[in-house]
Image (cartoon, rainbow, N blue to C red):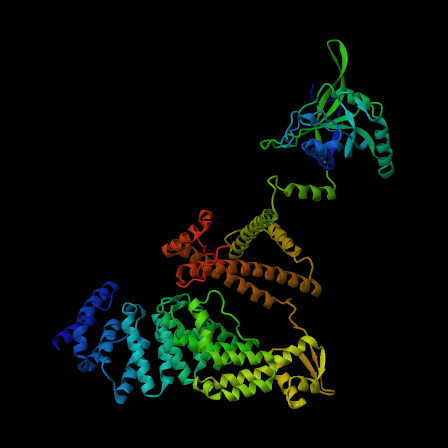
């Protein structure tokens, strides 16, 4: 007890200047085990500490407090405490002990889920991320937790700000996988299919030494979203996908590949029978809703194909060609597509004719200039980063070893009787 | 032989003449450097042909060939303006001038340019020679006082002015014998708008074989520095006006009037159609820049991905051993 009290006094004394805080950190590290030993009796001491001033000390105490198993009643009070702590703590102090902070926040998330109120955790978690990040391009371990809370509470908009940022630094690969996967799911929920495609693409093509479950699930969703958005399935993974992924992912997602194949044939009846046949498989993956969306997007795809052949078409004809039941349905579909901006057309209701138009963008406006200009600026910063990465890579000893080794094999003296390896 | 002329005539030379002479010289010179089998159709001054090697490698024979031709133009009062030139066939060893050719050319030019007269002749070389006097005298029956335009084809990077000299002939008494000698005269370059454009074009082709990239870069750098200077000047004016507004600098109405007139000069056109076209062209340029940036980025990305794959891919796509071809 005495050591704990002494610790409290020291925390109160040494939390003002930066150098003091560093020495405090050393003290706390040494005292960590003793704190954990006394975890059940630490609660009253927490009241003596002020989280907005003694953040580091408070963090250590909090972490030790919540270390043990937590009941539902305790969870309520802990949630309040941690939320208050997160909002009022000082970012520099907690960045000195990032692992402890992450553990505390993860426990916070668990407790919030225990109480079945994920919505309470969304805002504090967002603040926690902002305080932990060293820059907006940094992906911490808290990002996927935050997105998970957003998903469970269906509060998709909150996740938007996090998803908009470009990520350049990652702490752990698992964070990236989970982050992109959850992000993809949130985007699907909000029907931002382009963003979802981008995020899921990241999961599928991320470097991995063995296939992991996250990538497999992401690949299934990736196929479906790509059907909805592009109207065609991803045929081959690009060359920057790891070879492990390229070889194994397709085998593990067989029903989805077949779905994509029947989609490309363009017959709605076939695809519907296929979906019915494999309903349980899709349902067990929680993908049935997405599959249904993919099927309904087929109509859109067919209508879009019509714009390439015809200038005007009657609603009855559209209904026939796209295998819809009535011209009324066709009109509804076309209207929806015009509203979403997927096609440019005008419907003449008097004689039921649809005229397909060209993209009205003339590229003459000042807004377009600003838009292109900002894109160019973004591209320039990206290009600089890429050049930096490229240089780093060229100096990597592992790369030089491999590159040097390869060049030797092209020696023409070796050509005699030994079979050669060729880099195709 | 060269002292300053005292005839009091002012000479104006057009760049077309200089370009013509240099073109003539370059053509003849490059034709001569071909292997003998291909120079069967080459023209005057072929005495250097037998110096060619069989593999045609030797380009510079000494001495370089001399070309000859006529200059034509207008003389108004004391001003002589040389507009154009054409080539002549002249063999200095036999001193034979193809008169019929000269007359035919004169007639042709008379039809197109009725005001132009034969003013003199040109040649290439480093200095005027004694032998040139013969040609000079031969032309005296067409023009009583012909000019001699001499172009020095040697490229001297240190030299600042044009290697072109104009000589007149004067009767001087040397050792009691009246002789015609060449005297140097000064001249100015006069250009017509069309000539200015073509000379500009020629000037921007760097002698090092400037590729399109360096040309474009040079042009853009020029524009960039011009705009930068304009910007700094406007900045100076702006500061001045701000100071005047604050009261630090005494107000000067004449300067203010000048500034306001400057500001009223632009925009020159203000119409709907102009805006449209201008914005469209601006957008197009931006799109092209965007495309260029994209290509740049994609290629860097591609290289990066290749490097990454070579380094970290344990089961690389090099595959197993292939059969020996």
Q: Is residue B251 visible?
A: no
* Horizontal side of residue A51 vs A357, given as left or right: left
Comparing B240 with B201, the one in front is B201
> Percent x, y for residue A14?
21, 68
Number of labels in the image equals: 0
Seen at 36% across and 73% down, the residue is: A129
Q: Would residue A119 be seen by someone viewing this image from the given angle?
A: yes
| Residue B137: percent from left, percent from top | 80, 20
**Most distant residue in the left direction:** A2
The picture places residue B14, in percent across and down from the top left corner, at 73, 36
Q: The N terminus of chain A lies in which quarter of the figure?
A: bottom left
Find residue A250 and report its horizontal and vertical position in percent: 47, 74
- In terms of depth relative to the viewer, which is nearer, B85 or A207? A207
Identify the residue at horizontal 74%, vertical 87% (top origin). Answer: A351
| Residue displayed at 23% across by 79% down | A67
> Is residue B34 found left or right of A187 in the rendered image?
right
């Amino acid at each position: 007890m005495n050591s704990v009290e002494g610790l409290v006094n020291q925390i109160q004394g040494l939390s003002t200047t930066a150098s003091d805080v560093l020495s405090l950190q050393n003290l706390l590290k040494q005292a960590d085990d003793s704190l954990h030993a006394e975890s059940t009796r630490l609660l009253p001491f927490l009241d003596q500490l002020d989280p907005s001033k003694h953040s580091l000390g408070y963090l250590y105490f909090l972490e030790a407090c919540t270390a043990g198993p937590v009941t539902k009643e305790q969870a309520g009070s802990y949630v309040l405490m941690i939320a208050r702590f997160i909002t009022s703590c000082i970012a520099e102090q907690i960045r000195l002990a990032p692992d402890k902070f992450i553990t505390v926040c993860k426990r916070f998330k668990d407790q919030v889920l225990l109480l079945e109120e994920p919505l309470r955790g969304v805002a504090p978690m967002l603040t926690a991320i902002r305080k932990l990040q060293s820059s907006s391009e940094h992906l911490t371990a808290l990002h996927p937790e935050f997105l998970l809370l957003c998903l469970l509470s269906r509060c998709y908009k909150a996740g938007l700000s996090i998803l908009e940022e470009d990520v350049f630094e990652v702490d752990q690969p698992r964070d990236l996988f989970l982050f992109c996967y959850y992000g993809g799911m949130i985007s699907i929920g909000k029907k931002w299919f382009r963003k979802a495609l981008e995020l899921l693409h990241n999961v599928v093509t991320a470097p991995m030494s063995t296939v992991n479950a996250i990538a497999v699930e992401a690949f299934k969703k990736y196929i479906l979203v790509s059907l909805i958005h592009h109207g065609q399935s991803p045929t081959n993974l690009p060359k920057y996908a790891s070879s492990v992924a390229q070889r194994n992912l397709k085998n593990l997602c067989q029903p989805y590949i077949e779905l994509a194949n029947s989609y490309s044939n363009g017959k709605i009846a076939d695809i519907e029978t296929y979906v019915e046949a494999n309903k349980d498989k899709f349902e067990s993956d929680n993908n049935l809703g997405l599959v249904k969306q993919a099927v309904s997007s087929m109509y859109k795809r067919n209508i879009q194909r019509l714009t390439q052949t015809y200038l005007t078409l009657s609603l009855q004809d559209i209904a026939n060609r796209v295998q819809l039941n009535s011209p009324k349905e066709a009109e509804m579909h076309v209207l929806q597509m015009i509203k979403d901006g997927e096609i440019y057309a005008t419907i003449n209701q008097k004689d039921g004719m649809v005229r397909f138009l060209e993209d009205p963008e003339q590229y003459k406006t000042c807004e377009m200039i600003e838009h292109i200009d900002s894109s160019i600026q973004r591209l320039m910063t990206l290009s600089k980063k890429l050049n930096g990465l490229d240089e780093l890579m060229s100096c990597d000893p592992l790369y030089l070893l491999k590159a040097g080794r390869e060049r030797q094999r092209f020696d023409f003296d070796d050509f005699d009787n030994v079979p050669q390896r060729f880099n195709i | 032989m060269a002292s300053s002329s005292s005839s009091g005539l002012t000479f104006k030379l057009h760049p077309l003449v200089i370009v013509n002479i240099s073109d003539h010289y370059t053509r003849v010179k490059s034709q001569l450097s071909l292997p003998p089998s291909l120079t069967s159709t080459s023209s005057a001054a072929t005495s250097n042909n037998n110096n060619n090697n069989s593999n045609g490698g030797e380009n510079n024979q000494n001495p370089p060939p001399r070309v000859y031709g006529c200059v034509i133009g207008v003389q108004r009062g004391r001003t002589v303006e040389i507009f154009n030139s054409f080539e002549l066939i002249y063999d200095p060893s036999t001193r034979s001038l193809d008169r019929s050719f000269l007359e035919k050319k004169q007639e042709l030019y008379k039809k197109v340019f009725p005001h132009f007269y034969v003013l003199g002749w040109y040649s290439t070389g480093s200095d005027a020679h004694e032998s040139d006097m013969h040609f000079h005298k031969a032309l005296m029956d067409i023009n009583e006082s012909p000019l001699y335009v001499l172009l020095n084809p040697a490229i001297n990077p240190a030299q600042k002015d044009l290697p072109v000299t104009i000589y007149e002939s004067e009767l001087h008494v040397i050792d009691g014998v009246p002789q015609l000698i060449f005297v140097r005269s000064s001249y100015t370059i006069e250009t017509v708008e069309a000539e200015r454009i073509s000379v500009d074009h020629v000037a921007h082709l760097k002698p090092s074989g400037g590729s399109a990239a360096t040309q474009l870069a040079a042009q853009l750098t020029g524009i960039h520095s011009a705009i930068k200077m304009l910007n700094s000047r406007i900045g100076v004016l702006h500061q001045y006006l701000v100071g005047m507004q604050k009261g630090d600098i005494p107000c000067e109405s004449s300067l203010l009037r000048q500034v306001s007139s400057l500001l009223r000069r632009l925009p020159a056109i203000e119409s709907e159609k102009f805006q449209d076209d201008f914005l469209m062209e601006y957008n197009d340029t931006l799109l092209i820049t965007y495309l260029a940036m994209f290509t740049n980025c994609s290629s860097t990305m591609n290289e990066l991905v290749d490097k990454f794959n070579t380094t970290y891919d344990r089961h690389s796509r090099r595959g197993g051993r292939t059969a020996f071809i």
